[in-house]
Image: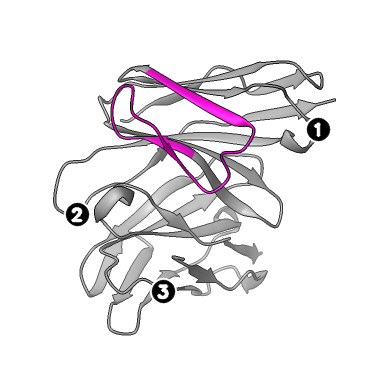
Amino acid sequence: DVKVTQSSRYLVKRTGEKVFLECVQDMDHENMFWYRQDPGLGLRLIYFSYDVKMKEKGDIPEGYSVSREKKERFSLILESASTNQTSMYLCASSSTSGGYSYEQYFGPGTRLTVT
Amino acid sequence: QKEVEQNSGPLSVPEGAIASLNCTYSDRVSQSFFWYRQYSGKSPELIMSIYSNGDKEDGRFTAQLNKASQYVSLLIRDSQPSDSATYLCAVNTGRGSTLGRLYFGRGTQLTVWP
């Protein structure tokens, strides 16, 4: 079974703090993704990565950065947390196996509150 | 803009009934289609994948794909209260720089009442 883990289930930070959210997958997947999910807005893609040290912006990258130094680990960084970044953050991974695949598997999520 | 549209619901069905969830997508070259189930406060869980036109059955779940109509659906037979969740439709175009990316609908909330 694919396992995607996230460093924290719940996190409370203060405005202006630098926040690190960590995601690790154990299936040797090439692709990793960071989403945020807010009521009424659905899943929104922040950043994704197809390979180590590679990153691409999603639909809402402003205020975020990412790091992928190892294949299994993908970090989301909030450079200076703001209250509008209070949300559920979800990490996912998938494999590029050619043909038709790309099933994404999600971690349990981190509920971040910025006060 | 790649769009995936779902009825937001809520969809309410009695226990034992068939629940029908629908999804349309805008990108004609989309190749891979997925249904996720998300319980309140939890992360999405993959329940069905479908890649070819027609039906794909897995237990009480049937996914149906019609690429000509750009339509994918999920049928849940013999619905149970434990099926109460939000169901997300996701689509992959499988090309270019967005290879691997999924486009998600906003989900349909399903309630199965005893």
> Which residues lie in the magenta part?
A47-68
Query: Would you say residue A48 sits in the magenta stretch?
Result: yes
Residue under label 2? A100
- Residue A20 x, y percent position in the rendering: 59, 17
Task: Examine the image and state in which quarter residue B49 appears.
Answer: bottom left
Given this view, does label 2 or label 1 mark the residue nearer the observer? Answer: 1
Residue in the picture at 62% in, 72% down: B14
Classify mark 2: helix, strand or loop.
loop
Task: Examine the image and state in which quarter residue B31 appears.
Answer: bottom left
Classify mark 1: helix, strand or loop.
helix
The image shows residue A12, relative to residue A96, as above or below, that is above
Classify mark 3: helix, strand or loop.
loop
Asked whether disc 3 touches disc 1, contact meaning CB atoms under 8 Å apart, the reply is no
Residue in the picture at 19% in, 54% down: A100
Of the numbered discs in the image, which one, if any, rests on residue A44? Answer: none
Asked whether disc 3 touches disc 2, contact meaning CB atoms under 8 Å apart, the reply is no
Query: Would you say residue B10 sits in the magenta stretch?
Result: no
Mark 3 on the same chain as mark 1: no
- Residue B84 x, y percent position in the rendering: 60, 57
Residue under label 1? A83
